[in-house]
Amino acid sequence: MTSDPIPPLAAEVKDGTPKVDRPVLVLVGEDGNAFSILGRARRALLLAGRGDEWPAFVAEATGGDYNHLLVTAMKWFEVE
C-alpha cells in the first residue's frame, strides 16, 4: 500500500469551480482484494459527498464476478 493521501476528488474547470463527475479511486499499487476495492470505493463516495449512492454501487458491483466488480468500479469512478 502507498502512504499517499487520497487524491483530490474534483477536477478544476476553466472558471475555477470544482466539478465532480466521478470520484477518484486509486487501485494501482493497492490491495486487489474485492473487499479492499469495495472499501476504497465506499470511502471515495463518502469523501465526494455521495454516500447515498453506496447502496446502488454495491448492488451493481457485487452482482457478478471479480471482473464485473472491476468494470463497475471503472464505470462509477475515475480509476487510477
Image (cartoon, helix red, strand yellow):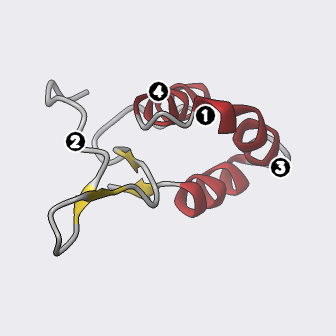
x 82%, y 39%: residue? 59
How many callouts does the rendering have? 4
Whole-number angstrom distance, CA of label 2 to CA of label 1: 21 Å
46 left or right, relative to 61: left
Q: Quadrant of residue 25?
A: top left
Is disc 4 surrounded by few (<14), some (14 to 19) or many (20+) residues within 10 Å?
Answer: some
x 73%, y 37%: residue? 58
CB atoms of marks 3 and 1 within 8 Å = no
Residue 6's label in the rendered image is: none
Q: Which residue is mark 1?
A: 34
Label 1 SS: helix
Q: Quadrant of residue 71?
A: bottom right
The tag earlier along the polypeptide, 3 or 1, is 1
Q: Position of residue 31 (x, y in %)?
A: 41, 31
Please identify, in this view, whether the residue under mark 4 or under mark 1 is nearer the observer.
4
Three-letter amino acid code at the position of disc 1:
Ala
Whole-number angstrom distance, CA of label 3 to CA of label 1: 12 Å
Q: Position of residue 55 (x, y in %)?
A: 76, 33
Q: Which residue is mark 3?
A: 64
Whole-number angstrom distance, CA of label 2 to CA of label 4: 12 Å
